Image (tube, coloured by chain):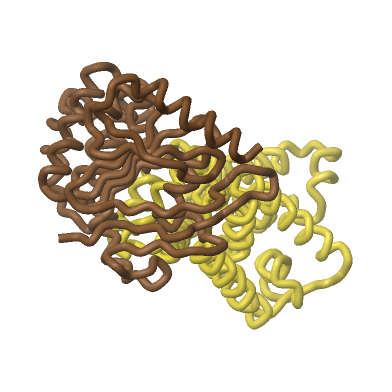
Amino acid sequence: MRPALWGESLKLAASLVGRVATVAVVVGIVVLSSAMLVAARSGNTQVVAKLGPDGTPDWHGFLAAATQITAAGGLAGFAIVLAWMFGREFADGAVNGLFALPVSRRTIAAAKLLTFAAWGALVSAALPVVLGATGVALGLGTPGATELAGLARLTVLGLAGVVLATPVAWAATLGRSVLAGVGVGIGLIVVAQVSVLAGAGGWMPLAAPALWAMTAGRGATLGQVLLVLPFGAIWVALTLGAWRRLQVR
Amino acid sequence: MSAGLVASGVRRMFPAGGGVESADLAMRPGEIVALVGLNGAGKTTLMRLLLGMLRAESGRVELDGVPLERLPGSTWAAVGHLVDAPLVYPELTTRTALELNARLRGAGRGVVEAALQDFGLTEYAGRRIRALSLGNRQRVGLAAALQHRPQVIVLDEPTNGLDPAGVIALREQLLARRDDGAAVLVSSHHLDEVARTADRIVVLNAGRLIGELAPHSAGLESMFFEMLLRDDEVRA
C-alpha cells in the first residue's frame, strides 16, 4: 500500500487539478461568501431581498452563505478531483502500466480513495479557519460560541461532501473517463437539490448534511447525516471491485 | 531463474472484430522473441493476455509455471513491460516518475540513477514529463520497464518515437538483459531491427501465430509477406 499511497499523494500535490481545486474550494467559497456579505451591507433593498432572510450583514448571514455555497460548490470540487484521479489513466493510456505489478489494482484504487479522503479532510479543515479569519478581517467581530459551532458544521459538511462524492470514482472507472465521473458529480448535486425541494429531507443522504448544516441541526439530525457513511461504503466497495476485475479493452 | 511466460491455446476475440483466435507462445529465459505482424493482427492483444490485462476466453497463461489467476502478486516484481503507453505522469519529473515505477515494482530508488544513465536521460532527470519530447518520453517508459532488472520483459513497439541513439540504447539493454537470462518478447514493425536482436521471430496474422522466421536469413521481408499470403490463401 505504501508505494501506491506515495505515488497518489505525489501526483495530487504536483498536479494543476489538485492545486486549482484546493484554491477553488477554500478561497472560492470564502470570496463568494464575502461578496454576499458586502452585498448585504450595501443596503440595496433589491439585493437584500434577493439574499433572503439569511442575507444579514453579520456572522449569521456570512456563515449561511458559506454553508449554502459549500453544500453545492464543495461537492462539485470534490467530484472533479475524484473524477480526475480515477479517470485520468484511462484517458492517457497509463492504465496499461497499472497491470502486472506487485501492487494490485485494488490496492491502487484504495490508495487513490485514501489520498482523496486525506486531501478532502485537509480542505474541509482549512475552510472554516480561512472563513473565520476573513470574517474577523471584514469587521464581523470575534466569533462567539454560535459562530464557532457554525464554522465547525462547515467542516462536517465538507467531510460529508468527500464521502458523498464516492459514486464519482465508480462512474469514472466504469466510464473509463474523467468526464463520466464529472457527469455523475453534476448528477449528485442535482439530485441533492431536487430531493430537498421534493421534501425528501433528512433521510436522503445526499441532502441531509446540507439540511443539517444550514438549519443548525433542525432540518436533519446528526444520525441522519451519518447515513452518508453506509452510502459511501457501498460506492467504495463497488469501486474497489471494479478495479479488481478491471481489464484493458 | 525464471521459467518464463507461456501461453497455451489462448483466445480472446472482440465483438467488433479482431483479437487473438488461438495462440501458443513460450518465452524462455535467455531468449529474445520478436512478435511481428501487420496492424490489427493481434500483437497488442496477445501481449495484454500474457500480462493479465485481458482475461482469455479459453486457454491459459502461466508465469513460472503458475496460472496468472493464481499468481502471487509479488511474482510480478520479476516482470517489466511497456504496452501502449508508459506509466508516467506529466506532472512528475523524469526522476520521480522512475522512482514511482521502481517503488511500485518493489525495487529500491537506487535503480533510478543507473536507468537515467542507461537511457541517456540524466540531463532530463529534473524536467517534468510533460516537457519531454515523444522520444524522450518513450525512453522514460522503457527505463521504467527495465530498471528493476526484470526476468520477464514484454515490450510493445518499443522503438516508437526513438531516435537512432535511442534504438541502439534499447538494443544494448535488451541484449544485456537476455544475456543475464531474461525472457524477452518484443513486438515490432521493423524487420531489420528485429533481425539484429531477436533469437526467434514469430509471425502473427489475423489473430493466429502462423509460423517462425529465422532472424538472420536473407530476404526476411519477402519471406514475411509470403508467409502472410499463404496463410490468407489457406483461410480464404
The location of residue B211, given as percent across then percent down, is: 41, 41
A102 or B128, nearer to the observer: A102
Q: Is residue A129 visible?
A: no
Rendered-image quadrant of the N terminus of chain A: bottom left
The location of residue A111, given as percent across then percent down, is: 40, 61
Q: Is residue A47 visible?
A: yes
The residue under the point 60% across, 68% down is A235
Q: Is residue A146 left or right of residue B33?
A: right
Q: How many marks?
A: 0
The location of residue A96, given as percent across then percent down, is: 44, 47
Q: In the orientation shown, which residue stands out farthest toward the top?
A: B164
Task: Determine which quarter of the picture holds residue A167.
Answer: bottom right
A60 or B172, nearer to the observer: B172
Q: Compared to B174, does A233 lie above or below?
A: below
Task: Determine which quarter of the picture holds residue B60.
Answer: bottom left
| Colour for chain A in the figure | yellow
Chain ID for brown:
B
B62 or B21, nearer to the observer: B21
The residue under the point 13% across, 45% down is B111
Q: Compared to B165, does B216 lie above or below?
A: below
The residue under the point 54% across, 56% down is B11
Q: In the orientation shown, which residue stands out farthest toward the bottom?
A: A223
Q: Is residue A146 left or right of residue B166?
A: right
The residue under the point 16% across, 43% down is B177
Q: Is residue B115 left or right of residue A144?
A: left
